[in-house]
Amino acid sequence: MNYVKTGLLLLALTLILVWFGSFFGGPRGAMIALVFALILNGVSYWYSDKIVLAIYKAKEVPERQFYHLYNLVKELTHSARLPMPKIYMVENKSPNAFATGRNPEKAVVCVTKGLLELLDENELRGVLAHELAHVKNRDTLIMTVTASMAGAIMMLAYMARWAAILGGYSRQKRGSGNIVALLAVSIIAPLAAIIVQLAISRSREYAADRQGAYFAKDPRGLASALKRLKEAARIRPMKEASPETAHLFIVNPFRSSFITNLFSTHPPIAERVRRLSEMKV
């Protein structure tokens, strides 16, 4: 089912890019955008996980140095009946984690250095179980592809915004009245990408929380971890994080505010904790 959803997602974001191209160059612009979108779709499907890991400068960690982390993941993969994923780490003090990979055989679980320093064993187990639930449900493909496509749309919107500000496009093509239209396009396109991110992310987090609690055989560890991660994100947000990839992380990597909460790709931590607290495993 997730392969179908991924296909529909790629189609939706492709249509956004084609619309973007037609605005700039009419039918020819739409055709160029379509070719670009097809190339981007292929790159997103096959290489989006590597792109995300490269963005955060994540490195694979050796088992001999992080044997305790490996042992926890091995225990959980046995419980979840999953192949052993690769384990990567980001040298960042902000505690967080995400999973990526187009299928369970190619999965990667990535943690930050801050996560290992902050959480106790039971809490860490809960976080790792949550990420493995995303792998089990094959959420990692659709979430990573979304990050790649959303990044491309954000880049095009940024270019459109500068074109409107500098006025070069309007003078050469359609007159000064179209500056407003160009600015509108530069705002609407990223909003569309954000709406797609919101649509795929919140329900998946609840499902991963629930399934991860079963893998760990204890919902309390994850509930405690979420509360600590929420407070840590307020004190030490991940400055290197980008909005396009924020939905990959177990908690929002940005400092909480009214605006970030309004457009957050994550459900409220309090509600996630409440649901976990009511679980019987």
Image (cartoon, rainbow, N blue to C red):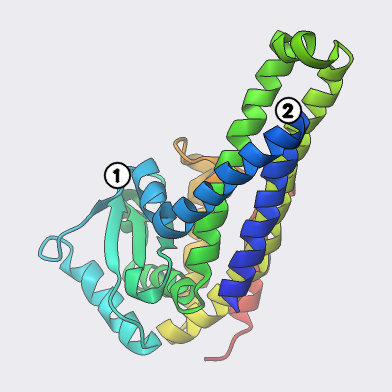
Vertical relation: 253 (above or below) 184? below
The answer to whether residue 96 of the structure is visible from this angle is: no
Query: Between residues 45 and 62, which one lies in front from this camera angle?
Result: 45
Query: Between residues 216 and 159, which one lies in front from this camera angle?
Result: 159
Residue at 83% across / 16% down in the picture? 174
On the rendered structure, is 197 left or right of 96?
Answer: right
**Disc 2 residue crowd, few under 14, some 14–19, many 20+, Cα 10 Å:** some
**Quadrant assignment, res 257:** top right
Q: Determine the residue located farthest toward the right in the rendered image.
A: 177
Q: What residue type is labelled 2?
A: Phe
Label drawn at residue 208: none
**Quadrant assignment, res 66:** bottom left
Q: Residue 56, image x and y in percent?
A: 37, 43
The answer to whether residue 198 of the structure is visible from this angle is: yes
Q: Name the residue under label 1.
A: 91
Q: Determine the residue located farthest toward the bottom in the rendered image.
A: 281
Q: Mark 2 points at which residue?
A: 24
Q: Which amino acid does label 1 sit on?
A: Glu
Vertical relation: 21 (above or below) 5? above
Q: Determine the residue located farthest toward the left in the rendered image.
A: 64
Q: What element carries label 1?
A: loop
**Separation of marks 1 and 2 at Cα, in angstroms:** 41 Å
Vertical relation: 85 (above or below) 93? below
Residue at 29% across / 53% down in the picture? 89
Q: Residue 197, image x and y in percent?
A: 65, 54
